[in-house]
Image (cartoon, rainbow, N blue to C red):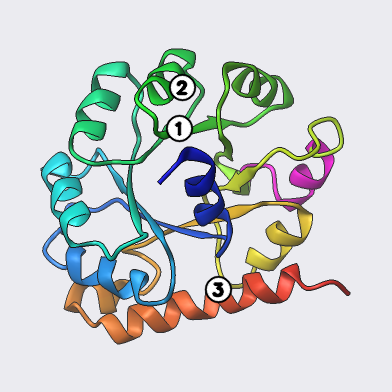
């Protein structure tokens, strides 16, 4: 999948599930639950035990047209390892120009973290494909509407503190995609491997995003 196509597939549903957990036993079943809702991209953070092997396994199991990304990446060496494992997008908590350059050299999407207009500007100048405003809860939805004034057309991702109650506010303010803690969205269901409950929670968020995108 080309970079532009992958960016579109991340933004189209507007929801990116991010797994960050030490309880990785239910991970594959939960990933399949998300893929089953039509979500094309899932992120695995490198803070999980055996994260690279989990990426390899997920890439082997994910449906055609779906993608697995690697998150919490802060150096070029880890970018290279994650891409070798099959990751097609790389996300970091902040902006590292060397990481962005490595992503583009290797043909994968770069998601760079930012929290101020200066950081957004630097990430765009470095060539980031998506700007992840993190932690989004610290600035709130109004921040997204304000910064899109000087940065029109920028694909902003809202990460941190997103819930069914507030997701519509972030989408209406201009977030192209939001992240949720994939193993925490329906935590008891995740722990028990109940994919129907996980899928239902994801579908509720997708419906809220779709409703917020409809013109008034």
Determine which quarter of the picture holds residue 165: bottom right
Q: Is residue 63 above or below residue 146?
A: below
Residue at 81%, 37% in the rendered image: 152
Q: Mark 2 or mark 3, which is nearer the start of the sequence? A: 2
Question: Where does label 2 land, which residue?
Answer: 100
Find residue 39 and name its label: none
Q: Is residue 201 above or below residue 24?
A: below
In three-dimensional space, the C-alpha distance between marks 3 and 1, rounded to whole angstroms, equals 24 Å
Range covered by the magenta-colored residues: 138-147
Q: Nearer the viewer, residue 92 or 129?
A: 129
Determine which quarter of the picture holds residue 168: bottom right
Q: Nearer the viewer, residue 191 or 97?
A: 97
Q: Mark 1 or mark 3, which is nearer the start of the sequence? A: 1
Question: Where does label 1 land, which residue?
Answer: 93
Residue at 69%, 42% in the rendered image: 139
Q: Is residue 81 above or below residue 206?
A: above
* Prevailing secondary structure of the magenta residues: helix
Residue at 76%, 40% in the rendered image: 153
**Which one is closest to the eye, mark 3 or mark 2?**
2
């Amino acid at each position: 999948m080309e970079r532009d196509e992958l960016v579109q597939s991340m933004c189209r549903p507007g929801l990116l599930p991010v797994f960050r957990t030490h309880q990785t036993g239910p991970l594959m079943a939960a990933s399949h639950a998300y893929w089953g809702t039509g979500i094309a991209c899932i992120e695995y953070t490198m803070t999980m035990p055996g994260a690279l092997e989990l990426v390899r396994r997920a890439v082997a199991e994910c449906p055609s047209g779906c993608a697995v990304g690697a998150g919490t990446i802060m150096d070029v060496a880890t970018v290279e390892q994650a891409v070798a494992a099959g990751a097609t997008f790389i996300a970091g908590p902040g902006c590292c120009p060397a990481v962005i350059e490595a992503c583009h050299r290797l043909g994968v999407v770069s998601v760079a973290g930012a929290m101020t207009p200066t950081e957004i500007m630097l990430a765009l100048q470095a060539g980031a494909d998506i700007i992840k405003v993190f932690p989004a809860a610290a600035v709130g939805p109004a921040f997204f509407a304000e910064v899109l004034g000087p940065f029109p057309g920028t694909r902003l991702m809202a990460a941190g503190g997103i819930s069914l109650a507030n997701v519509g506010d972030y989408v209406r303010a201009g977030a192209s995609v939001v992240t949720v803690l994939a193993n925490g969205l329906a935590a008891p269901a995740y722990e028990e491997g109940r994919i129907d409950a996980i899928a239902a929670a994801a579908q509720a968020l997708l419906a809220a995003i779709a409703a917020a995108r409809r013109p008034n």
